[in-house]
Image (tube, coloured by chain):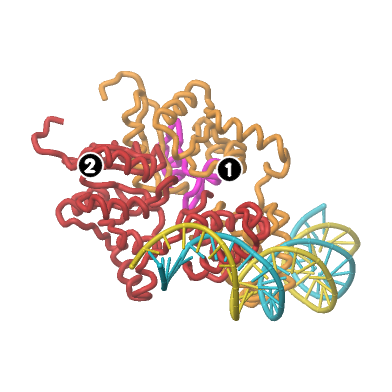
Chain colours: A orange, B red, C yellow, D cyan
Amino acid sequence: MVKAYKKVQVAIADDHTLLRNALAKLINNFEGYAVLLEANNGKELRNKIIQHIIPDIVLLDVNMPEMDGYEITGWLHKNYPQIKVLVLSMLSDERTIIKMFRLGAKGYLLKNAEPEELKRALDSLMNKNVYLSEYVSDKLVSGLHKNADRDMQPVVLNEREREFLRWACTELAYKEIAEKMNVSVRTIDDYRQALFAKLEVHSRVGLVLYAIKNGLVEL
Amino acid sequence: MVKAYKKVQVAIADDHTLLRNALAKLINNFEGYAVLLEANNGKELRNKIIQHIIPDIVLLDVNMPEMDGYEITGWLHKNYPQIKVLVLSMLSDERTIIKMFRLGAKGYLLKNAEPEELKRALDSLMNKNVYLSEYVSDKLVSGLHKNADRDMQPVVLNEREREFLRWACTELAYKEIAEKMNVSVRTIDDYRQALFAKLEVHSRVGLVLYAIKNGLVEL
DNA sequence: TAAAAAACCTCCCATATGGGAGGTTTTTAT
DNA sequence: ATAAAAACCTCCCATATGGGAGGTTTTTTA
């Protein structure tokens, strides 16, 4: 605390209070870093930044209520491009990783990383403006290889499709879903086919998995 | 560090290294508590305890690879009943909570709790041998109300059923799963029926939802 | 205002899924 | 040693699901 140089200011946004606080402690113990602010979700983070509490680095959970990691990353990239976003996630799928980098993230860290890796990531972000673990680099490269186009533009669902998707994550048969949504079973078939195409799945289980992975349903 | 009295020895088992380490820091900062050991999963924790590294309290994640929270809690309760288990979970469904308490857990904490609540929980565990947050008490009571019998005895799946359940959370058809598991489709039907009965669902979507809610599959 | 797309529909068909009645063999527990 | 259970199987049947060809009506957008 008697250091003369200015510490790197870190912001943490994560709705898991326990993890967030613990992370803050961890980071405050890192040489040269200090936690400037903590937020429960993207909206809270944005509000504080708007009030001129400007961190150098934002440590961000992908899945948050109110304003998730995607939104806030996009907003930061647009309005405060100098703030470096380090994504902290439990998910290790290509899509999420690629999506976050496209939105402007500078690094991606899995939640089961070692604390040393977090330190390395922060250092790398300050020195080289980017952090890529071997694991993430692999995912990025192989991901870019595959579908240069489709994976890049985020999937957009309309309200009707989202509603159907939520019902699909239910033990109701399509016939029953049709009744719930006041349409014929055939229309449900159309929703299903549209979603199958958009989400690149071919079964109801695929729909359920997508919906859960992307937080479109409550568990 | 110059305290005269003996600190309460805490063990942490969680596969999220970052959270685990951070939690350790947090707890080491609590007056009167010290982290004795950290483990990546239940099996690792068990091995250390067998080697006579005996904590007073175990802080346990429900969802871990190798040996999950359920197994290790049952094992601890049977072999080291004096060790108090505090469950740390992201899930807040009645079933999980009730299951853990039946298996011998002494407290249940959500991962988005405040650090203060963790401190309170630890204190309560040492003083009163139990910790119930208001939230968890509610869930317990309402849960007990409903199905006094079935919900109480924890659902036990065997290895074959768990394997099938993991495949069920896949876009593979049962026929393909049968090939993967080297059994006939009819045998798969048996697994399915057994699971439908045990988990009280009646569709594949129900299986998927259960598996995800209970952390039996990786997302 | 014309074209496109979104929202809804009918009829058809193959395969997947869920459910029931029965059976053998191997493993586990008493 | 014997009973129970777990693990595996055959055959049958009804419904659910996934996929295709085609159509009307309303809303959006160029």
Nearest the viewer among A71 and B168 is B168
- Residue carrying label 1: A93
For residue A1, above or below residue A93 = above
Question: Relative to B26, is A79 on the left or the right?
Answer: right
- Residue carrying label 2: B54
Residue at 16 percent across and 39 percent down: it is B7
Q: Circle 2 marks a residue in which chain?
A: B
Q: Could you tell me residue A215's position as x and y percent?
A: 53, 54
Q: Quadrant of the N terminus of chain A?
A: top left
Q: Circle 2 — which element?
A: loop
Question: Relative to B202, is B92 on the left or the right?
Answer: left
Which label number is shown at residue B112?
Answer: none
Regarding residue A218, the answer to whether it shows in the image is: no
Residue at 62 percent across and 37 percent down: it is A102
For residue C22, above or below residue B172 = below
Snapshot quadrant of residue B203: bottom right
Regarding residue B52, the answer to whether it shows in the image is: yes
Tell me which segment is drawn in magenta.
A44-73
For residue B165, above or below residue A103 = below
Nearest the viewer among A167 and B155 is B155
Pick out the residue farthest to the top: A4
Amino acid carrying mark 1 in the image: Asp
Q: Could you tell me residue B47's position as x and y percent?
A: 32, 40
Amino acid carrying mark 2 in the image: Ile
Q: Residues within 10 Å of mark 2 (few under 14, many from 20)?
A: some
Q: Residues within 10 Å of mark 1 (few under 14, many from 20)?
A: some
Residue at 34 percent across and 38 percent down: it is B22
Residue at 68 percent across and 59 percent down: it is B175
